[in-house]
Amino acid sequence: MGRPPCCDKVGIKKGPWTPEEDIMLVSYIQEHGPGNWRSVPTNTGLSRCSKSCRLRWTNYLRPGIKRGNFTPHEEGMIIHLQALLGNKWAAIASYLPQRTDNDIKNYWNTHLKKKLKKFQTPFSSHNMTSDSAPSEHFESRASLDVSSHSSTNHRPNQTSTYASSTENISRLLEGWMRSSPKTPDPRKTATTGLESNYIGNSAAAGTTSSFNYYQPKHEQDGGGDQLISHEEFESILSFENLNNIAWGKSSSSCDSSTLNQQTAANEDKFNSIMPDKKQQRSESNVPLASFLENWLLDETTGAQVDDMMEMSPIF
DNA sequence: AATCACGCCAACCGCGCGGAG
DNA sequence: CCTCCGCGCGGTTGGCGTGAT
């Protein structure tokens, strides 16, 4: 016997939120802070269930949320973290403070899953498109601070910046009162015309580059020869290899000699793919997988990736 | 111009967890 | 202990926009 749905009461409004409702909610939260969602509908007069209010706040109105296109760095982070953590969107979102779990989940389901699936091959030693739990090989690494980045009550900005909701309100009002000029493609900057007015100040609006780790740009544009095969790149980031190389575990399919060969081959591939990182990599004196992981998780990688995408035809 | 198919994403739904009584 | 309740998470859906025919 399950709990009755919270939203099945008569008079509870569903569907898209209006600017007026947003303002009511933001005003209330600005005054009282997020939390105690049960009392929000009654105290605000909103004809919404508490859950809907919470969702609207956390996914949309919460300050510090970045909307719009994901940068290559963010995409890389999501792919990497999804492989590490599985579909723990809240945990993944904790590594991307400006993105909501819902946003990341949507982006994964609509973009990244497809991209990875497209390139999934029998060579892959790990099903990257799998929705399964993270590879148990990675479980120890997956603790990569899941605890300290715990999804629950550890949303960056959630507690510290809600006070800046005045910013949101002003944006709400600004957009609400302004006429709504239609952009040629609202999705480039926001999801709806409404959002493009009062929320869609996407910091990523100028970023148009697409993810190309697994999908070279010229292929996206209609096909052509790949300068590097998917198998090659994936083999480097092969999770079994990463696991073996970085964390010293062995698998039945990988003895030490083949592991050494694979490691050397991966080093060569890495040097050819990322020549500008060769020096940095050799100086870092860390395993390749660690280097790649650090690179992916590096705050500054986004800009580096952007640079690399301009400089190198393979990105 | 009309219709259809598809992609995208905000919002909903159901379930599990943890705290309070 | 058990039950109730509030909350958060992950999966799914519905509506809208856009491109193709």
Image (cartoon, coloured by chain):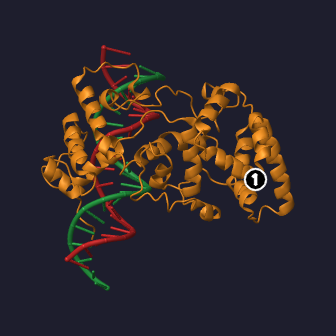
Chain colours: A orange, B red, C green
Quadrant in which residue A276 is drawn: top right
Say few, some or many: other residues with alpha carbon within 10 Å of mark 1 (under 14 / 14 to 19 / 20 or more).
Answer: some
Whether residue A135 is visible, yes or no, is no
In the shown orientation, is residue A188 left or right of residue A121? left
Residue A265 position within the rendered picture, expressed as x and y whole percent measured from the top left:
83, 47
Q: Nearer the viewer, residue A67 or A29?
A: A29
The residue depicted at 43 percent of the width and 57 percent of the height is: A151
Q: Nearer the viewer, residue A11 or A145?
A: A145
The residue depicted at 70 percent of the width and 45 percent of the height is: A234
Q: Amino acid at mark 1?
A: Pro
Q: How many marks?
A: 1
Residue A24 position within the rendered picture, expressed as x and y whole percent measured from the top left:
19, 41
* Chain at tag 1: A
| Label 1 residue SS | loop
Whether residue A80 is visible, yes or no, is yes
Q: Which residue is mark 1?
A: A287
The image shows residue C16, relative to residue A27, as above or below, that is: above
The image shows residue A289, relative to residue A216, as above or below, that is: below
The image shows residue B13, relative to residue A166, as above or below, that is: below
Residue A102 position within the rendered picture, expressed as x and y whole percent measured from the top left:
40, 47
Residue A3 position within the rendered picture, expressed as x and y whole percent measured from the top left:
25, 66
The residue depicted at 46 percent of the width and 27 percent of the height is: A205
